[in-house]
Amino acid sequence: MQPLRGRSEELGRLLEALREAEHGTASLAVVSGEPGLGKSALLAAAVEQAERQGFLVAQATAQQTDDISPLSSLAPALRAGREPLIDTEHFMELAALNTQPLWLAERLAAFVGRRLDGVKALVVLDDAQWSDPLTAFSLRVLIARLASHQLLWLIATRPAPGGVADQLVNAVQTQVPVHTIELGPLSAEAIQDIAKDRLNRPVESGLALQLAGVQGSPFLAEQLIAGLYLDNTTPGAPGLEHTAPGASSLGSAAAGTPASVTPVGPLLTAPASTGPLPPGLVEGVRRRSTGLSENARTLVRTAAVFGSEFRLEDVAALMSEPVAKLATALDEAIHAGLLTDAGSALRFQHELLRSATLADVPPSAQRALHGAIAAQLIAAGRGAAVAAPHVLAVAQPGDTAAVSTLRQAAQELIATMSTTAAEVIQHAFELTAVDDPLRAEVGVDVVAVLLAAYQYDRAAAFADDLLSGTALYHGPVTPDLRATVRLHLAPRQWVTGRLQRQDLFAPGAAPHLTERLTAYRTLLAPDEVAPTELLPRLTDPVARAIVHTAAAEAARAAGRYATARDYYVKARETPSDLGSLPDTVLEVGELYCRAEADELPAALQRSRELMTAGDWQTAAHLSVLHARLEYAAGNLDLAEKEAKAGLWWMKDLHDTALVPASHQVLALIALLRNQPTKARELAGTDSTINALLALADGDDKAVTRLRDVPHEFPERIDVLVRADAEDLLAAQVAVSPSVAALGAHELVAAGNDLKRLAAATEQLRTTGRPLLRALAADRYGRAELESGDRATGVATLEEALDTLTKLGATAPAGRIQAVLQAAGVRRRRWAAVPARAEAGWEALTPMERRVALLVAEGHTNRSAAEELVISASTVGTHLRSVFGKLEVNSRVQLTRLVLERFAPPPNA
């Protein structure tokens, strides 16, 4: 490998990042610079150093045609080498998820994470500006998920504000350190060193003068030496005559781009600008081309129009020449240092060489070639998506054939490359006239594709403009058009809580569309027309499915879980069509109801399956459901993981509707783990969580506030048991007589009847809800102890203690442990309760907390003693301990601290 010249500082920064990775600090390094400044050379030097230090290296180069192939930019890095990051079996599993980017990225992170456990690694992506959308998205997930590994992510890109690199940095900069390295022109000394390395001799004065004209570009220096660049400062380029025609293959590292780098080609999106081409490069390439045969010159120029890479057979077909006849011409172009054979495709040695070649093709000829290429690709059955870049290069406003091809291309791309499909359909829309009725049809396509690409805000704004008579569209807004657009938006609007009643009217629309809009109004406001009353009047299956969902939602809100479950099942039986609600969201509702209707194990198993194969656009709903079911099953670690995953998806998808639901699960887990401060941070204004916190802080009066627990609260039955809400449990049994509800009601209704308590506790053993079972055993065990049956009471309480300890629920376990210890039970180890904090609120004992709360309410020592049924002297003792642990000196300071902590006051 040729030495790297003029980049010691930049290489040093990358080596420092490698050292940090070796010590466990993962990071992202972004190298940016214009074409030809040596980005690839710097990456190659970093790779060489990493391999010397024992790093596992995975690298790939994005190609400009990657836009239509999901994960094609990153895949070579995943699969390269004898020990790839992803084996064949796992890679095929990922391929099946290319329409579910969130799940694919999660699975990819899991596979790569396991592969890199204990391994220091460098992952490199060159020309990242060409990354396909799935690669760009997956990198965001991978970098965040693997932040604890010995890993350096290194990407190179052209400057592109708001491009792939900028989006990546913005997404991960809070998870890992980011190193940005901007490459500028090399110094004159470094350029001369490159020339000396290539020529293996001192640089002559004439050449030195020419090198001064390359403007610090190592690529142009290479081409000057190879004779493909003419510096105008010294006409004739003396001293280079001895250079072999293929000499450009020398020093590819210093030139900044190895042979595999993709040249510029037609894009579905605007390419990053390379800036004006150096005139000397165009003239140099033209001079080199004059030495080629006519066939070779035609081959090179045609190839330049084809794009970043091409197949020889495609160029041969366009030139009406047999492939065999072009073999000699291809060999000439390769020997001249213009093209390179990558096996499956042919490419230019560097994108600047392609640009220089293209500059010598008249615009009219380029347009004609693009048109011929598009027609040829479509005729050959290569698909509209492959032809789309060439169609865009020649299409003119009003070209209905071009619009038709682009619409077809968008449909071909939507399943696997929805972001690219959105750009294609936008181009198709712009090619139609503002008063052409076809523009309305394409406009509907735009809304649908934007929604498929999860670009809801763009879709909604576009829809509003389309239907409002703005400059976007001047044609007739028919009732069917209005209804169709609104029905495209309605499912996502309902899921995210953005559906508005005024958008659900389109007088004069087709009957099936009118029925669907009416059904959505029922879903939005079931009090307007009862779903069960509307169903008999509907004939459209999609409308009926929406109304079945409305009936399910109403039944679920009322706690009638079995009824709601059956309505969800009916709603899911209808095939998907315009306006259909996302099936995964409906199944989430169904599984929630199944779990509440004595089907928790089956619901939990199905939710686990959905977590790896569900609809990525409803990932947050799935994560929250899964977190709740894992919590119900007592799997606190898994519940916490899924609740946090739900928050991550919500942040990434800019949909925060379910944040409170995730916080509820996390706060409940924190309370079980004796982490009240963490629970308080998560609680916000949640009245039930705050009531539970007040109880944990010793405020017994807060138990009455638990009666207000809403139906949707996680494990609501547990809370009602704690509140002794016999009437509310009876109401729950009346509408949904599940084993859990029946057992909980009997547990509370039993009072001190030991036989009934025992029967209720035994009944709750069958629910698969260990936290509820432990709650029942705690209540029954204490009752047995108080009745004098020490053997039964201790055994039952120890069972509850063991269950809670195994689950990691240290707070309730600690309370049971205290009861057992007070009863004189001795164990070799009491492992349930961690050591109490020495200072702060968590350091207070339950009695000290109660004293602090009463004092903050204005009680004197005597009145607090009467409230607590203890002596005033004992209150004083507790109060002095509170002052010391909270580091306060007066009742006023204590009151202020309590009010700041609780706000509103705990007994409000």
Image (cartoon, helix red, strand yellow):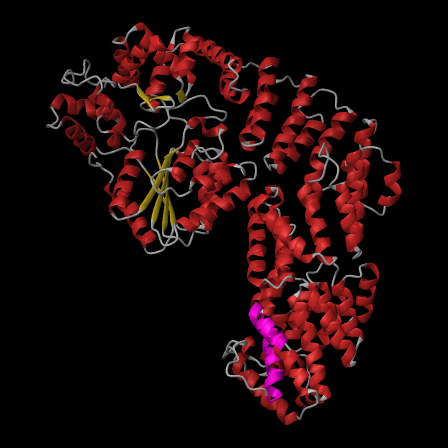
Residue 146 in the image: above or below residue 397: below
Judge whether residue 522 can be spotted in this image.
Answer: yes
Residue 29 in the image: above or below residue 819: above
Residue at 26%, 48% in the rendered image = 53
Pick whichever, 37 or 392, lies toward us: 392
Quadrant of residue 64 in the image? top left
Question: Could you say where residue 905 lies in the image, as x and y percent from the top left?
Answer: 68, 72
Left or right of residue 413, residue 719 in this image: right
Question: Could you say where residue 236 lies in the image, as x and y percent from the top left?
Answer: 18, 13
Residue at 70%, 64% in the rendered image = 767
Quadrant of residue 573 in the image? top right
**Quarter containing the N terminus:** top left
Residue at 23%, 42% in the rendered image = 8
Q: How many marks?
A: 0
Left or right of residue 430, residue 131 in this image: left
Pick whichever, 125 or 226, lies toward us: 125
Residue 816 drawn in magenta: yes
Question: Could you say where residue 33 lies in the image, as x and y percent from the top left?
Answer: 34, 34
Quadrant of residue 732 in the image? bottom right
Question: Could you say where residue 296 lies in the image, as x and y percent from the top left?
Answer: 32, 10
Pick whichever, 660 or 377, lies toward us: 377
Judge whether residue 722 can be spotted in this image.
Answer: no
Residue 327 drawn in magenta: no
What kind of secondary structure does the magenta stretch mostly adopt? helix
Q: Which residue range is magenta in the image?
A: 799-824
Residue at 52%, 12% in the rendered image = 375
**Quarter containing the C terminus:** bottom right
Pick whichever, 483 or 599, lies toward us: 599
